[in-house]
Amino acid sequence: MRQKSQVRKKYRRKRRSFSITTVLFLGIAVYLLVHTIGYLTKDKIGIFEVQASAEYSSSPTYTGIISREETVYTTENAGYINYYIREGKKASVGTTVYTLDQTGQFASMLADTLGDIQSLSNENLKKIKESMISFSTSLDPMYFKQVYEEKSNLSISLIDSLNMTALENLGNTIDTSAFQKISADESGFIVYRSDNYEGISPTDVTASTFDKKNYSSTVYKAGELREKGGFAYKLVKDDNWTITFPLSEEDVLSYNDKTKLEIYLKDIDVTTTGNFSTFKASDGTTMGKIDLIKYGSSYCENRFVDFTITEKDVYGIKIPKTSVVSKSFFTIPKEYLTKGGNGSQLGVNKEVVDTNGNATVQFIAVSIYETTDTEYYIDSSNIASGDTIIKPDSQDKYQISVSAPLDGVYNANKGYSVFRRVEILAETKDKEYYIIEPSTKYGISPYDHIVLDSKNVVENQSLY
């Protein structure tokens, strides 16, 4: 019996076909991947938001040496000294300034009275608080000796305040026959400290005078035993004083023609004006000298003073110096600017000559970045040096050749960089910012966004 032959059937495997949808999906995925990687790896462009116009100080803080009419008085005899006038207060002629106690009995009476004092007056507390605030704002971390000096000053201020309160409480119980009472022979402000710069005049000041390693001062305490001829007190005659300070080359250019300067004294929150002059110190340093007739008594305990010159205060917009870029533009006479297109575009009529020598006129739109009385500063990708433009309604021609630089920033409001003109008025005292004119035509306005570092972008670059 014949067996049926087995017939093998061959099946053809179907090929997979990519649909258009799949191809588009993969294309979009690759596009997004490439752009995501590009975004993550490219340098980020910093943006700065312009703040509202304000008053800014472009003047650094100057440190000056104080000169004044001052006299140091010494003790006529040895003894324990106690003061009747608080330091910094004014004494009139005949006012008792201090007493000398040769026996030490007065010191015992004073100690007993101090034990009954529970607290200082508001005036005394205010003075000590002001001293601490002034010290904290003027501390030089490289001159740690100041900390010990201030500690001594505060201790003495506290003791003097307690002594004065005790003296007031003793009143008429003091037997004055047991003491030598010394009165002021002229009026002035009383100081119980001395330094090695007493009697210094502006012409004595050199650059080394400001090195605090060369300066020393001593604060004298009430109740101490003084030898005959020892320091008793110093008297500053009046409020007249002189500040001498070194000038930089920039300062000399700014102030050399000034006869008066307005300054701000931060320690006492006062603005005042004094007569100003300059001179060459013995070491060749150019010094400035300000003569003042007010507020000298506020600094009678000081030899150094920090101040700013308010004439350098500027009203404007503050922007980072890194945002500013200089760019060159073509300048054209104003009468060559015209309107074209739909009548709203500003531009110029450019002469175009073909290969056969035939001349035609083509309107070229331009952007204006600055204007003067006679010229416009323009820019266009279709304008080049050597091009000729034609005056509207005339046959007069002007060949473009002159270019001039302008300072500006890149505005980022539209998502791409657009140059905008800035007028720099000054720089801040920390040298990090420019103060610019707040109402510059074709410029920037408060709350605009500008590129933080202009070196990272070019004109019309996409920023986001």
Image (cartoon, helix red, strand yellow):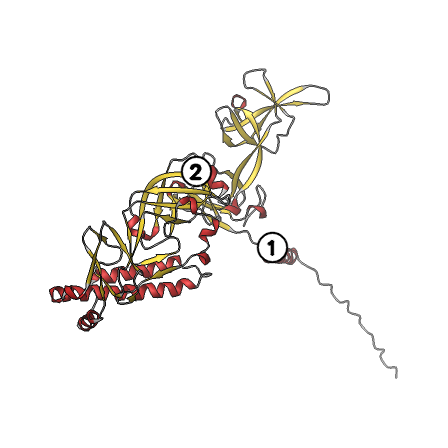
For this orientation, the residue located farthest to the left is 172
Badge 2 element: helix
3D distance between C-alphas at marks 1 and 2: 48 Å
Q: Disc number at residue 255?
A: 2
Query: Looking at the picture, how far across and down is residue 430, in whole percent?
Result: 46, 50
Residue 256, image x, y percentages? 44, 36
User: Residue 158: x percent and y percent?
Assistant: 27, 65
Instruction: In the rendered structure, find residue 42 and report the number of the disc placed on it.
Output: 1
- Left or right of 285 on screen, residue 16: right
Q: Nearer the viewer, residue 233 or 125?
A: 233
Q: Which mark is residue 232?
A: none
Q: How many marks?
A: 2
- Residue 335 appears in the rendering: yes
Q: Earlier in the sequence, mark 1 or mark 2?
A: 1
Residue 157: x %, y % from top left = 28, 63
Tell which residue pokes out farthest to the top in this image.
395
- Residue type pointed to by label 1: Lys
**Vertical side of 100 occupied by 55: above or below:** above
Label 1 secondary element: loop
Q: Are marks 1 and 2 in contact (CB under 8 Å)?
A: no
Q: How busy is the neighbourhood of tag 2: few (under 14 within 10 Å), some, or many (20 plus)?
A: some
